[in-house]
Amino acid sequence: MTLNQLKYAIIVAESESFNEAAKKLFISQPSLSTSIHSLEEEIGVQIFRRSQNGIAVTPEGKEFIGYARQVMEQYELLDARYITKSEVKKRFSVSMQHYSFAVNAFVHMVKQYGMDEYEFAVHETKTHEVIEDVKNGKSEIGILYINSFNKNVLEKIFNDNYLEFHKLLECEIYVYMYKGHPLAGKKLIKLEELKDYPCLSFDQGDYNSFYYAEEVLSTYEYKQLIKANDRATMLNLMVGLNGYTLCSGIICEELMAKLDALSDEKTNLCAGIEREFLKRIGGNCHLPVAAYCDIVSEKDRGNDSNKNNRLKLLAMFGSEDGKQLARTEQVWDMTSDRNDIVERAVRDIRYKLEID
């Protein structure tokens, strides 16, 4: 096993292609394939799974690549210190579940230590990947949630992988929703009261187990459940669908400000018109479609006077074959029925595309 072979394996894993990796390494693809095959035979582990669709790193390969990265990073530090005599920044990385307080803490840490000596990285990701990142040396620290239900399972995983868990804090259970939610004014909310609203949960991908859930009460049978994979989507679902999630209650002020911005009356009105247009026009992931609604003043529209604000809807829709694209612009008084606005936009689009 050589350092070059470790480097080759890392680049192939990052490129997800022998051909692309060979270009980056300035060697021929056959030479690269031969070197990786020799490495796999030597260590007795298949690092990459080959198929007609390309390559994929095997579970054993992910572990090996993690160790290979650590070796290469240490070699680079040795080389910089004793051979090239150059200064190399120290690296510090954190992997975490989707917690705003953890991101906030990371920001304060970066400000405290500065970026002159350190190269920082933060990975907001799934529970399994948090564990894998620390296990494989991609991150020095992982931040995740443990409760009485998943404690034994996660602690066994930690022990099996020679990882240590240190408690940061203990949390109560809070319902997290936007301020315009029908239940937002209540100090105490029962689970029964939440049954008619969608519970929002972070998707855990291939590891969608109760034990890997980031939210409390993961085994509860929710009447409505929506999974999302990023915080921005989660916030929009809270506003648009009166969704909620169960969490620690530790929310940074910056995130609350963003949620307040999403939940103001203007945003709710415009978002509702956009959703209604997409619903009526029959938009989906396979068709080019867009809708943007805003509140404009007469001055914005080129008139010097500052009369009553008006609703403006810009919308586009394309034919299934992609050969036609129609656009419409509707400007109505604020007192107009939003269904009339949407209906007029849909009719105009369909007329232009001749798809009545």
Image (cartoon, helix red, strand yellow):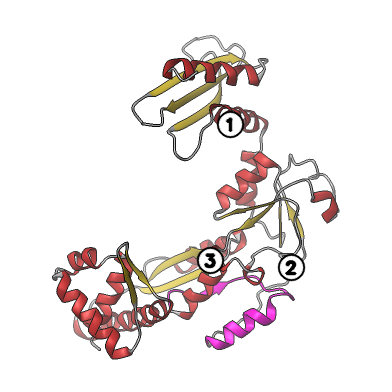
Residue 171 - label: 2
The relative height of residue 173 versus residue 49 in the rendered view (above or below) is: above
Q: Amino acid at mark 1?
A: Lys
The relative height of residue 289 versus residue 251 in the rendered view (above or below) is: above
> Alpha carbon of mark 3 to alpha carbon of mark 2: how far?
28 Å
* Badge 3 vs badge 1, beta-carbon distance below 8 Å: no
Q: Residue at x 47, y 31 (%)?
A: 290
| Residue 60 x, y percent position in the rendering | 41, 81
Element type at mark 2 = loop
| Residue 72 x, y percent position in the rendering | 30, 80
Q: Residue at x 23, y 76 (%)?
A: 86
Q: Earlier in the sequence, mark 3 or mark 1?
A: 3
Residue 279 - label: 1
Mark 3 — residue?
206
Q: Residue at x 18, y 69 (%)?
A: 25
Region in magenta: 137-161
Q: Is residue 152 magenta?
A: yes
Q: Earlier in the sequence, mark 3 or mark 2?
A: 2
Within 10 angstroms of label 3, few (less than 14), some, or many (20 or more) residues?
few
